[in-house]
C-alpha cells in the first residue's frame, strides 16, 4: 500500500463517521474485457472487506445479451475473500451472500417483474391490495437491501441499476475507468461518504 493509500486508510479508520455497510459497484461488460479487469474486481472486494464493508452488490450493465452466459461463468469463478453469488430473478437462495452480482438485469425490468408477482398474488386472493406497501414490494425485488454507497466508474450515470433501492443511497461517480481503478480510488469514495450528511430524502 502506497503512502497516500495509507493516509486515506488512516483517515477512514480514525473518523467518527461509519464506513458504508453495503456498497454497490456499477461497471460495464466492456470494462470486464480489459486486461486485468477480474484481478481488479477481486482486489476491490478485498479492499472493501478490509475497510469494514459487510455486503457488496456488483451490477454489470450489458448491451449484448449474448455476453451474459460468458460473464456469468467468469464472475461465478471470481476470487473473493467471501462467497460470491450471481443473482437472477429466481435466485432466492443467494439473497444473503456477502457478494451479489447481477448481469444485465436492469432496475426497470426488476421492478416490472415485482409488480407482476404482486398482481398475480392479488388476483389469486393471496394478497389484499390494501396490504401492498414498500415492504411488500421489496420482498419481490432481486436485491432487497439498499446500498449505502453506489460507486460508478467512467461516467455519471447509473445505467438503470437499483432504481428502487438506491433512492437514498450516496452516489460516487469517478471519471477513472475500471481498468485504471486503484485502492486509493475506492478509499476516496469511502472517505467522501464519511464526510457527507445523509438525509434519506429529508
Image (spheres, helix red, strand yellow):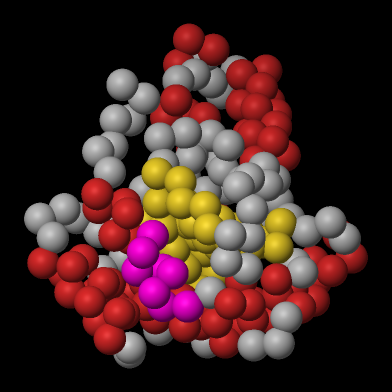
Q: Position of residue 5 (x, y in %)?
A: 31, 79
Q: Is residue 62 above or below residue 185?
A: above
The quarter of the picture where the C terminus appears is: top left
Q: Is residue 71 above or below residue 109?
A: below
Left of 89 or right of it: where is 20? left
Q: Residue at x 62, y 83 (%)?
A: 38
- Residue 89, visible in the rendered structure: no
* Image quadrant in which you'd find residue 131: top left
Q: Considering the whole magenta stretch, tell me its main secondary structure.
A: helix
The quarter of the picture where the N terminus appears is: bottom left
Q: Residue at x 70, y 63 (%)?
A: 28
* Image quadrant in which you'd find residue 54: bottom left
Quick one: 74 or 116, which is closer to the camera?
74
Q: Position of residue 101 (x, y in %)?
A: 58, 64
Which residue range is magenta in the image? Answer: 182-189
Q: Position of residue 42 (x, y in %)?
A: 51, 82
- Residue 194, visible in the rendered structure: yes
Q: Position of residue 104 (x, y in %)?
A: 73, 55
Q: Residue at x 29, y 60 (%)?
A: 191
What is the residue that sits farthest to the front in this orientation?
4
Q: Is residue 129 above or below residue 12?
A: above
Amino acid at each position: 500500500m502506497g503512502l497516500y493509500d495509507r493516509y486515506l486508510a488512516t483517515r477512514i479508520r480514525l473518523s467518527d463517521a461509519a464506513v458504508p455497510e453495503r456498497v454497490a459497484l456499477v461497471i460495464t461488460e466492456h470494462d470486464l474485457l480489459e486486461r486485468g479487469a477480474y484481478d481488479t474486481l477481486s482486489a476491490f472486494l478485498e479492499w472493501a472487506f478490509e475497510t469494514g464493508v459487510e455486503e457488496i452488490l456488483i451490477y454489470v450493465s450489458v448491451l449484448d445479451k449474448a455476453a451474459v452466459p460468458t460473464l456469468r461463468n467468469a464472475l461465478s469463478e471470481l476470487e473473493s475473500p467471501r462467497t460470491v453469488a450471481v443473482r437472477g430473478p429466481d435466485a432466492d437462495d443467494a439473497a444473503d451472500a456477502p457478494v451479489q452480482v447481477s448481469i444485465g438485469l436492469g432496475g426497470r425490468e426488476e421492478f416490472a417483474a415485482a409488480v407482476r408477482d404482486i398482481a398475480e398474488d392479488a388476483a389469486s386472493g393471496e394478497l389484499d391490495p390494501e396490504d401492498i406497501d414498500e415492504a411488500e414490494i421489496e420482498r419481490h425485488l432481486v436485491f432487497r437491501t439498499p446500498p449505502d454507497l453506489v460507486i460508478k466508474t467512467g461516467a455519471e450515470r447509473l445505467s438503470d441499476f437499483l432504481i428502487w433501492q438506491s433512492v437514498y443511497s450516496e452516489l460516487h461517480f469517478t471519471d477513472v475507468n475500471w481498468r485504471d481503478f486503484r485502492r486509493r480510488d475506492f478509499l476516496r469514495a469511502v472517505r467522501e461518504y464519511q464526510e457527507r450528511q445523509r438525509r434519506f430524502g429529508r
